[in-house]
Amino acid sequence: MKRRELKNKDTEIYHLLKKEKKRREKGLELIPSENHTHPAVLSPLSSILSDKYAEGYPGKRYYGGNGVIDRIEDLCIERAKKLFRVEHVNVQPYSGSPANHAVYFALLSPGETVMGMNLQTGGHLTHGSKVNFSGKHYKPVSYGVSRKTGKIDYDEVKRIAKKEKPKLIFAGTTAYPRKLNFKKFKEIANSVGAYLCVDIAHIAGLVAGGAHPSPAMHADVITTTTHKTLRGPRGGMIMVTKKGTKKDKDLPSKIDRAVFPGIQGGPHENTIAGIAVCLKEASQKSFTGYAKDVVENGKHLAKELKKRGFKLVSGGTDNHLMVIDLRDKNISGREAQKLLDRAGITVNMNTVPFDPNPPGNPSGIRLGTPAITTRGMKKKEVEKIAEFINRVLEKREEKEVKKVEKEVKTLCRRFPIPK
């Protein structure tokens, strides 16, 4: 019914949506921050909930008619608290960047020092990048990875923290293929009297499914998106691990005030309902199996790529993603992305640590296994995918690209996107 209504109202958007649906069905989605969201999760997004204003929080709204909305948001909060084993959750951030923005607003004053992983070695824009609000309104200092190992050197992180004395430390990444040692980060934060915020946007689903250690015992605050490995709609959450720490008993209310009225107005309750559905899905036993398979597929893909002569940043992966350093292949990340895209394989160009090239034309590509795992693919299929990538990037001939594209479509037909 909804499709027919859209077709009648706007045929251009209707047909573009059909094209995008077809692209996803026929291709391999290997961007690690993307996934295939279940229709049950997507359903509330286009529901009547998108019509309702609900400024404020459950029981304390500035608009009437929010009785049902309060129940939906409360349900979402309780599911998040139980799944991630935390004491307080704000589910209103519009996405991950606003969630991180709210943490700054709650815990820092403009000009105070924040420490995070630098963008080039796998950090996020909101962790102190100079082109972002976090680097413009606050004093950013950064840590990176060892040139030798491609991994975080925690002694170096401690040295920088002791020297710079940040008030807030971010532990979190967008392109780091190894587990984070949350205990060490907390020890470093404690040694300089800093708050520790762990951004689990990429690994939230792995944490929920028990395939990655949880930061709940170490972080003061946890931020996350709700899509990526968590397989929900595009939203965000902020979690406080305790109802008042020795350092700051008012932390939950500080976070809530920072989100609203600090940086946002009315929350998107249709998205919050979708988050609630995805959190219920993530609490099921089947999701634990999914999270485990994502990591196993990631490790196997890394192994198969290395077998075919590809150099991986840090030598492999512990999670859902990996970064291929293409400098010895005489091809840029941008060129590789375009070639693979034509073959029906979607990846994203990405910088590598100490990259001599600019971000707009970096030396690497980033890829991961959440979406192909959602389709039910396992090690056998992962081996085929590694071979597809190798053939496209080694031969770089249109004839071979078309041949791989045909084989990709055949593989995808065997593993349809769940409906």
Image: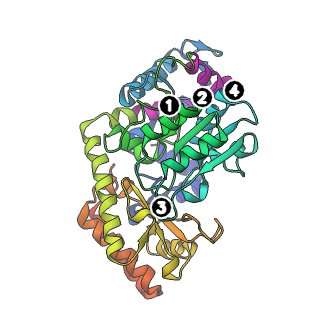
Distance in Å between CA atoms under marks 1 and 3:
37 Å
Q: Residue at x 52, y 71 (%)?
A: 337
Q: Residue at x 50, y 67 (%)?
A: 365
Residue 47 picture location, percent across and down? 50, 34
> Dot 4: what SS?
helix
Q: Is residue 24 magenta?
A: no
Residues at circles 4 and 2 in contact by the CB criterion of under 8 Å: no
Q: Which residues are magenta?
A: 250-277
Disc 2: which residue: 267
Residue 181 picture location, percent across and down? 42, 43
Q: Is residue 269 magenta?
A: yes
Circle 1 residues within 10 Å: few <14, some 14–19, many ≥20: many
Disc 1: which residue: 272
Q: Is residue 155 left or right of residue 374?
A: right
Q: Is residue 161 left or right of residue 44?
A: right
379 to 263, vertically: above or below: below
Circle 3 residues within 10 Å: few <14, some 14–19, many ≥20: many
Disc 4: which residue: 262
Quarter of the figure that contains the N terminus: top left
Q: Nearer the viewer, mark 1 or mark 3?
A: 3
Q: Main secondary structure of the magenta part?
A: helix
- For residue 150, the mark is 3
> Dot 3: what SS?
loop
What's the residue type where badge 1 is placed? Ile
Distance in Å between CA atoms under marks 3 and 2:
40 Å
N-terminal of the two: label 1 or label 3? Answer: 3
